[in-house]
Image (cartoon, rainbow, N blue to C red):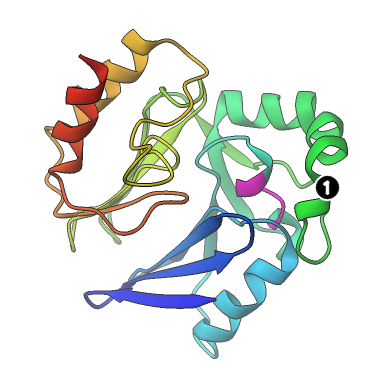
Amino acid sequence: MKITKIQNRNVVFTFHTDFDQNVHLIKGTTYNFIIDTGLGQACMEPVLDYLGTDSKPIIVVNTHHHWDHIWGNGSFRNPILVSHRLCRELIQEKWDEMLGKYGQYSMGKVVQVLPTLVFENELYFPEDRVRLFYTPGHTIDSISVWDEEEHVLNVGDNIGDSADAIVPSIYTSKEIYKDTILKYRDVEANTWVSGHNGICEKEVLERILAELN
């Protein structure tokens, strides 16, 4: 596992299996935000160890319903777990199928825990200057998380897994995905975090758009 600190309050934990898996922590003023929970409870242990005695409440965010982003949801007692409304529905619908197909990748205990707070378009935490907003593309339920204070944007899997595959698998349509990439152009972010790729800069958008055209 690799820990990458971005400025003062953003930290990315990268787990290496057959692919790289990123878990993103934002140490806010009122809440600590954990963005995606990886492959199981073993992915959450180093994040919680890193927080140590920091007693601020934790908000867990699922960027979308795919198994490699939700299997650690059971690591918390009575969590505030946030997602898009469709994400909660898709976790319920596809849980058994995903566990049966990809269970060999689990890291530690895997328990189905559904989001407890869902939204449609946007959810803002003003004390922490953290904004969640709907960004369908990779999946129909995808959201992004923007730290407005440090100009860091987590886009889930809307950036592909590697430099050679910068456009991800698209489970919506090319048009919906392109609209989201164009929307990202208006976001004041310098650092871009994705589910599997390395830390990127905003120029990644132009590379994606060139691939789409």
Residue furthest to the bottom in view is 53
Q: Going 83% across and 47% down the picture, which residue do you hit? A: 103
- Counting from the top left corner in percent of width and height, residue 15 is at 56, 67
Q: Going 24% across and 30% down the picture, which residue do you hit? A: 208
Quadrant assignment for the N terminus: bottom right
| Three-letter amino acid code of the residue under disc 1 | Gly
- Counting from the top left corner in percent of width and height, residue 173 is at 42, 10
Q: Which residue occupies the foreground of this view, 47 or 116?
A: 47
Magenta residues (range): 68-72
The answer to whether residue 77 is seen in the rendering is no
Circle 1 — which element?
helix
Would residue 207 be counted in the magenta stretch? Answer: no
Residue 159 found in image quarter: top left
Residue 206 found in image quarter: top left
The answer to whether residue 45 is seen in the rendering is yes
Secondary structure, magenta segment, majority class: loop
Mark 1 is surrounded, within 10 Å at the Cα level, by few (under 14), some (14 to 19) or many (20 or more) other residues, namely some
Quadrant assignment for the C terminus: top left
Q: Would you say 193 lies left or right of 139 here?
A: left
Q: Does 115 appear above or below 193? A: above
Q: Does 61 appear above or below 29? A: above
Residue 49 found in image quarter: bottom right
- Counting from the top left corner in percent of width and height, residue 157 is at 45, 39
Q: Which residue occupies the foreground of this view, 187 or 76?
A: 187
